[in-house]
Image: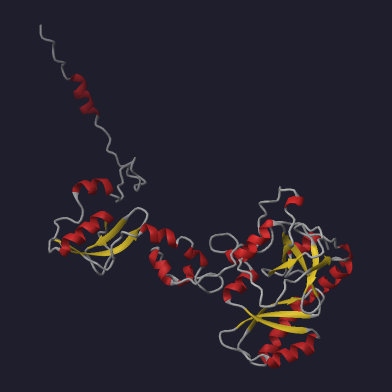
Amino acid sequence: MNSKDICLSRGSFNPTTDSSDVVLSCKAVGCNKLDTFDWLEDIPESLRDGDVVEVRFKNTRKGFYKNVNKIRLVPGDIIAVEASPGHDIGIVSLTGELVLRQISRTNFRLADNEEMKKVYRKAKSVDIEKWIQAIEQENHTMLRSRQIASKLELNMKIGDVEYQGDKTKAIFYYIADDRVDFRELIKLLAEEFKVRIEMKQIGARQEAGRIGGIGSCGRELCCSTWLSNFVSVTTNAARYQEVSLNPTKLAGQCGKLKCCINYELKVYADARQDFPNTEIHLEIFDGTAYHFKTDVFRRLMWYTFSKEDSVNLVPVPVERVNEIIKLNKEGVKVKKIIETEEERQKDLSYHNVVGQESLTRFQDKKPQHHHNRNKRRNKPRPQNPQ
């Protein structure tokens, strides 16, 4: 196995080569979950040395460790770091000044009287071999733990298992809707796998980030590539953007509302500041106009005179809607929902000016009669007056 295999397949791979082929560096950058782009890479190392490094582990788990021994580290180095108990094996993902910005961005905090964990050394061949042996057991451990939890009839789902680098502890990530009493489960798992057990509850979004996948946009999931802070998403955000409230289209692979619904919400909120309430009807001489839909960035509101059916939709500029509402409050009904000049400027209806809907438009033309052509030819020309 080479370093690239470890980097690309940290959490779900089956080694096919001998572990002695492993080198002590993993420099495949840009292929990892929650990877960070180092835009200070061209700065000399002497100017960007720092005491803290960012280390990544399985899937989306990362940590910050203090380089107390002043070891020269670069992104991709496989190192041994302090754990509780023993040591863990991770891959350096970021060094230098950007680590401090990452700490601030991720709101990393230490508990009271707690010191930042340390970097021990660069991983040796013995460390790498034990690390690979631990990785090989993760898939089997996850499947077996699911069987044990099912026998105990626990309402939980074990979605992932991660062994510590020294193979003395295993972290079981699980999902549960309610509180679960897994004390008996921990005893059985400890007897089965002979390691220290740690249970960690995660949400549906965190599980999707750890597993990964391709979204409906055709790109990798945001939660597995760059998104680390999950903000609650509501259907009001979709309504505000005039998005169809279709559960199959709004839900992501985690079964929750897509996080990308919040991305443009502030832009829509800023653009709709002067938009009137859609519950207000417009009183026209021809009847009452009801709101049907809104085109925010074109600043058009579509109205129909039928409350049940969406027929004869009329696009009305926001300024005109506000004007009609103001006149209606004064007890005045307008003659037309849209002025003639605005109708010429804002007419968005489709006009078939070239007859493209007819496949036989060139064949339907009537042939010209030759006798009419001859009559035009034989018609006497007017004589010029003297």
Nearer to us in this view, 22 or 46? 46
Residue at horizontal 77 percent and vertical 64 percent from the top: 67
Point out residue 355 in the picture as x, y percentages from the top left corner.
Answer: 32, 44
Q: Does residue 348 lie above or below 63 as drawn?
A: above
Residue at horizontal 27 percent and vertical 59 percent from the top: 313
Task: Count all numbered tags in the image, as a single digit.
Answer: 0
Identify the image's colour scheme: rainbow, by chain, secondary structure or one colour.
Answer: secondary structure
Q: Does residue 172 lie above or below 285 as drawn?
A: below
Quadrant assignment for the N terminus = bottom right
Nearer to us in this view, 156 or 383? 156
| 327 left or right, relative to 354 | left
Residue 18 seen from this side:
no
Residue 250 seen from this side:
yes
Point out residue 85 in the picture as x, y percentages from the top left corner.
Answer: 79, 79
Point out residue 277 in the picture as x, y percentages from the top left corner.
Answer: 28, 65
Q: Does residue 63 lie above or below 200 as drawn?
A: above
Q: Which residue lies furthest to the top in this view?
A: 386
Quadrant assignment for the C terminus = top left
Point out residue 345 in the picture as x, y percentages from the top left corner.
Answer: 26, 46
Quadrant in the rendering for residue 64: bottom right
Q: Residue furthest left?
A: 386
Residue at horizontal 26 percent and vertical 70 percent from the top: 308
Quadrant in the rendering for residue 162: bottom right
| 127 left or right, relative to 138 | right
Nearer to us in this view, 124 or 136? 124
